[in-house]
Structure formats: structure tokens, C-alpha cells
Image (tube, coloured by chain):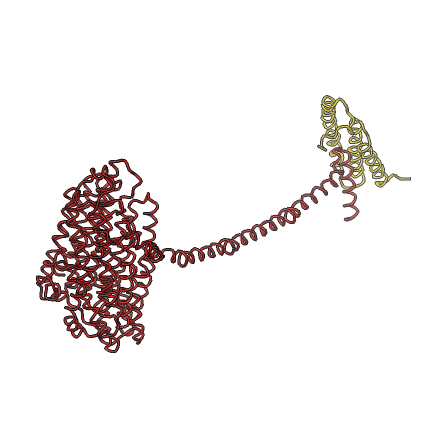
Amino acid sequence: MTNELLITLGILLLPLVSFVLLIFTGKRYVDKSGLVGTSILGIDLLLSFYILFSKLHAEVKVWDFTFTWINFHTFVNSVPLKLDIGIMVDNLTAVMLVVVNLISFLVHLFSLGYMKGDVRYSRYYANLGLFTFSMLGIVVTNNYLLMYVFWELVGLSSYLLIGHWYEKKSASDAAKKAFIVNRVGDLGFFIGIMIVWMQFSTLTFNGIFTSIHNGIIPFDSNTWLTAAGLLIFCGAVGKSAQFPLHVWLPDAMEGPTPVSALIHAATMVAAGVYLVARTFPMLTADALLYIAYIGAITAFIAATIAIAQNDIKKILAYSTISQLGYMVMGLGVGAYTAGVFHLVTHAAFKAGLFLASGSVIHAMHHALHHVGDHHTDAQDIRYMGGLKNKLPVTFWTMLIFTLAISGVPLTSGFLSKDEILAGTLAFSKFTGHTLIPIIGFFVAGLTAFYMFRMIIVVFFGEHQDTHRFEHLHESPKVMTIPLIILAALSLFAFYSFNPLSASHGWFYEKIVPPTVVVPEAVSATPTVEFIEEVHHQHSLAMILSVSVAGLGILIAFVTYYWKKISADAVANALKPIYNFLLNKWYFDELYDKTAVAATIGASKVLAWFDLKVIDGIVDGSASLTRLGSYISGKFDSIVVDGLVNFTAYLAGFFGMLLRAVQTGKVQTYIVFALVGLMILLALYI
Amino acid sequence: MTITLTHFLLISAILFSLGVYAVITRRNAIMVLMGIELILNSANINFLAFSRFGGLNIEGQMAAIFVIILAAAEAAIALAIVLNIYKRFNTVNVDEISLLKD
């Protein structure tokens, strides 16, 4: 094991140390727990920067360490059956290490202010540590087995953090919903893993891809290969909140806002995208097509819903789903680097957006608390307005994040989104699926529109309540510094020196698409040709994306700033559509009516079966036993006791008879003796 | 008519039977004791008869004397018992003394 891998192992384990430390000693040192967690994450971040720089300068492609965990000492298809696990660091992992640790560190820092005085302050930090550990685990493993383990661990820590304020029914419900919906996707993931294990007898990425490269495919059928890829993608559908399992993410906003920034915007939901990127070499053209469409549909649905929402965190949640759809679509069309790139840039600006919204909510909350108003929703943008001057740092940073997510030039979001859109154009050119780029550009416009709607409604205009307005204050330094750092990272310079194209930046140079190993007959467009075509389409994509984004921003300003168009009038005119969007396409209702109702129905049937049949059998056997014991009891008391009593009675009866003989008079006995003597004499003489 | 052993034995048997009859039928304990005396004496007659006619000779007469002594001793003890019975039950009627039954 090289030194770098040892350091990576250290990076992985440090947050676990933080978790264990805080969970056991947190109760005693509540005030210190935040600082402890944050400083451990700070060290972790520095170490991961070291790993990133040394990896990017290293000659070796992958640092890998594998050891055999279980050796079954048998052979399957003349391949030794053993379970290998291990860790590896390639460029993608190194970048992800920094992304996860950076966001996690900033969220730790931000929470020092945001969660101050919380009822379960130390447990919050402990859970953040657990989450960071699990997420890093997903990133550094080199096999599906450990990945699945860490996959479930992030699910667990997400559950714990969503339900952090579990006294609120909505929070505990949301936690359960997130966990259960994720299980649906994880089931597919697990079946996919089993197919892979059945065929290749190994779960390491390298081993699987080598086998496929050598022409071994599951059950000798390309369909099975596609199925395996899609089933593994199911895990990503759950975790990354893709259609049709996207319903848990908006509800997950019940957790503390920094948690939403860390888990439900930047890292955990990106795990699905990371999974697709890791699995990329074994995805067939068919699988990629499905993935692209799932991503496009998700992006479209979520973007339309986001327009009609009024809760600041819900808007951001739907925009997260939409952007995740973008990433998945990017990977699906074959724009591997663009998808991963969008993951990284999105992590920065979306975490920033959530933290900024946290700052806004924090300020609103304090102001409402100060004026004694406990009814107004601190997260509803309709009660905000005019916050620009009261929260200047929050406003300016949030504006940068919004520009980034809208894809305005000079921001990181512009670079990555542009590459994805160019990818979709190239894809449609090769395959003829023109719907995907159309959705892509349309969603880009929608994104710009609803994000600017939020900015204008929250920060511009007049605040309704002047009394409340006076009590609004900018958040403390620990909360604004993370915002400033993330705002800086949302600018183009960190990724590419050319503000209009990232394709010559370090990211594109270092994160190269992996070699596709699927048989040529079912593989997608070869990478080289694809990248060539992306280059051709780049200027067109840039012009189109900038113009749709500009159009979206313009409409937002016209509607909400200058109020030339009345939003209410439009909503009234298009009431059915508006209600449809406001109610999130009725997905929750649909699932309640179908999946949930079916589950409850099935459980009722099962409960009936349990109650009547199983319990009936048990009760029946019980009453059978009772009957048996009754009979045997009766047999005992009548037959056995009767025999015993009869014997006793018989003895008594003869006793009665013989009793008459015993007169107690000596003379009688003498008579008997004489008679007996005479009889004896008569007999023997 | 010569008196033979048979005559003696007959007398003895009659005496024995009378003794037994007395023992069995008499109500009074004293009478029962007297019956026992009769039985003992019938046995004495047998002893003497066998000493005269049988081969017993002098031993028969000795046994008879032993029996007479024994009868005397028996009478003494038995009368003491009867006296005690009377003290205990206020009667010497053997029919009423049936403690063995309980």
C-alpha cells in the first residue's frame, strides 16, 4: 500500500473518528462538539487537497489496493471464487474527495452559527461525521460490495439527519419516506450487483470491466448486460432522486438547512451520478439511452414544478432534482466529463444556494421570533422581499450562485451546463433523438426563470411588515464565510482559464472518459468521434443556452420586478396547469393511490391472513390441544381414577364383608380356631 | 368289663368338649376360666391314661403334675386378669368386652 493510499484511508476514517468521539462524549461536552467536528473535517479537507494535487501530478493512472476478504476455495466457470475488496484513487475519486470534504467542512462551519443552541447539537455533528464517512466510503471503494454498504450508510445518515427534529411529525415522516423510497431503488441496485456477481465472480470494478472487455457478458446475452447496467442505475434513480423516485427529495427539506446543502444538494444525491460514472464502461447504448431519457424527464418535471413553489427550500429542492436530471442526462448521452463536471460545479453553487437560503431563513426566523409572530412560515418567499439591503453578503453570494445555476457566462455553471447541452446536441446528431436537446434547452430557460423569480421575490421589492423588517440582520461570520468561499468557487477561474469553454481546462484534461468495454455491437458512439462532434456543436450550444437563460431571466424580471405581466393573472388564466404544477404533478397523490394504497392493501390482506389463517392455525392447534387435554383429563378422572377407586372400593367391600367376622370377642375367635382346626383335621387325617 | 385306654380317652374327650363348650358359651369370665380348667384336666387324664396303658410310664404322671402346677399358676394369673377387667369395665361379661373389634 502506498503512502497516498494510507492517507486516503486516513481521510476516510477521520470523519468516523469524529462520529464515534461525538456520539460517546458529545453529551458531556456539548459546546465543544461543533468545534471538534469542524476541526477534524478541516484536517480531512487539507489531506484530501494533498491527495488531489499529488494524484493530478502522478504518472500512475490509478492507485489501487485490493485484498481478498473471503476466499471460498472453490471454482466457478474455472475462475477462483473469492470476494475482493479494497480502495482506489483515480482522478475522479481525488476530485470527489475534495468536493465531499470541502462541502462537508463548509457545512460544519456554517452549522456552528445555524445550529447554535439546538436541542441535539452534538448528535447533529456526530451524524454529519457519519455521513461524511459514508460518502467518502462510496467514493474510495473499488468494488460494488463496499459501495453498496456505504450506499446504505449514507441512506441511514440521511435518514437520521432529515429526522433531526423528529418531534415534528412532518420531519419524521419525511425521514421515513426518504428511507423507504430509496430502498425501492436499492433493491434494483442489489439485483444488478447479484447479476454481476453470478457472472463474473468478482465485484471489483476493474475485474468486471476486464471480464467484459475479454468478451464475457452475463448469460451470453447483450440484453442481460443492458439489464445489469440499468438495475445498477436503479440505485442511482433512488439516491439521485430521478423520475419516478424523485418524490422523497422535496420532503427531505424537513431536515436542517445545512443538511439539505450537504446531503440533498451537493453530495449524497450526487452519489447516484457518481455511480453511473463508475459504471459507465459497462453501459450499453440501450442502457445509456434509457438513462438519458430518465435524466431528461426528471429535469423537465422538476423544473416545471419549481416554477409554482413558494417555499424557498422546495424551490431549491426541485431545482436540485432538475440539475441532477441534467447530470444523468449528460452521462446518458455520453458526455461523461460534462456530467461529472456539472456534478462538481453544481455541488459548489447548490450547496451555496442552500446555505444562503439557510442564512435567509435564519434571519427571518429571528425576526419573526423577535416580533412574536409564530404563525408566519419563515421559509415562504411571499413573506420575504426587500432583503437585499438587510442581508448584503447573503444577497450578493446568492446572486452569484443563481447566475451560476442559470448558466450565465463567467460562472462555473455556464461551463458545465454548456458542455452537457453540447453533448445532447451531438447525441441527437448521432442517434436522432432530438427530444433530449429540446428538453435540455427548455429546462435551461426554466431554470433561469424560476431561480430569478426566487431572487427577485426574496431580495427585491418591499417587505410587507416594516416592524419585522427592522429586526432582520445579516448572519454571523461563521455563516457568511462559507458563502463567500462557495461563491468564489462558482466562478469560472477555478475550472478553466477560458471563461467560455472548459474543454481545455485542467478538469477536462484530467477527468477523461473511461474506456468503454461493452461489445462493439451494442456500444454507444465511440468517445473520440463523440468529443469531436461536441466540439462542433459547442458554439451553437453556447449561443442557444445563453439566449434561453437570458430569456428566462428577462421574463422573470418582467413578471416579478417590473410587474408588466401579472403572475397571478397568468396563474388564474392557466389555473389547471398552475394547480397541476403547484401540486407537483400529483406524484405524491398518485403514489398514495397506487403504490402506498397497494402496499397498505397488501398488508391488510396479509394482516387478515395472519389474523385468520395463521392465528387460526395457532388458535386451532391450541383449542385442539385443549380438547385433547380435556379428553385425557376426563379419561384420567373417569377411567384411571375409576379403576383406582374401584380397586379401593373392592378392597373396602371385602373389608366390609370380612369385618363381620371380626366380632372382637375372644370366644368367637376360639370358635373359628376350632372350626379351622377341625377342617384341617378332616382334610389331613 | 375291663376298663381300657379307650374309655379313658372317651372320658377325656367328653371332658375336653365340655370344657371347650364352657369356654365358648359362658358369658361370665370366671366360668370361661373354669372351662379352661376342664380342658387342662382332660389333658391330664390323657397323660395319666397313656402313662398307664401307653409307653409314657412315669413321664406321663410328671407331665400331669406339671399341668396341675401350671393350671394353678394360670388360675392365679387369670383371676388377676379378670379382677383387672372388672375394675376397668365394671363387668365380667365377656360379651360386652369387645375392644378387639375397634
Front residue of this view, candidates B29 and A195: A195
Please say if A111 is above or below A591: above
Above/below status of A662 relative to A351: above
Figure quadrant of residue A265:
bottom left
Q: Can residue A49 be seen in this view?
A: yes
Q: Determine the colour of chain A.
A: red
Chain B's shade in the image? yellow
**Quadrant showing the N terminus of chain A:** bottom left
Q: Is residue A153 visible?
A: no
Dividing the picture into quadrants, the one containing residue A493 is bottom left
The x, y position of residue A288, in whole percent, is: 26, 69
Image position of A266 (left or right of A598): left
Residue A585: percent from left, percent from top = 34, 58
Front residue (pair B22, A358) = A358
How far across and how far down the image is residue A310, in percent?
28, 50
Q: Position of residue A253 (x, y in %)?
A: 28, 50
Left/right placement of residue A618 relative to residue A155 reads: right
- The residue closer to the viewer here, A673 or A427, is A427
Q: Nearer the viewer, residue A682 or A130?
A: A130
Residue furthest right in the image: B1
- Picture quadrant of residue A25: top left
Q: How many labels does the image show?
A: 0
Vertical position of residue A269 compared to residue A335: above or below: above
- A489 above or below B33? below
Q: Which residue lies furthest to the bottom in this view?
A: A521
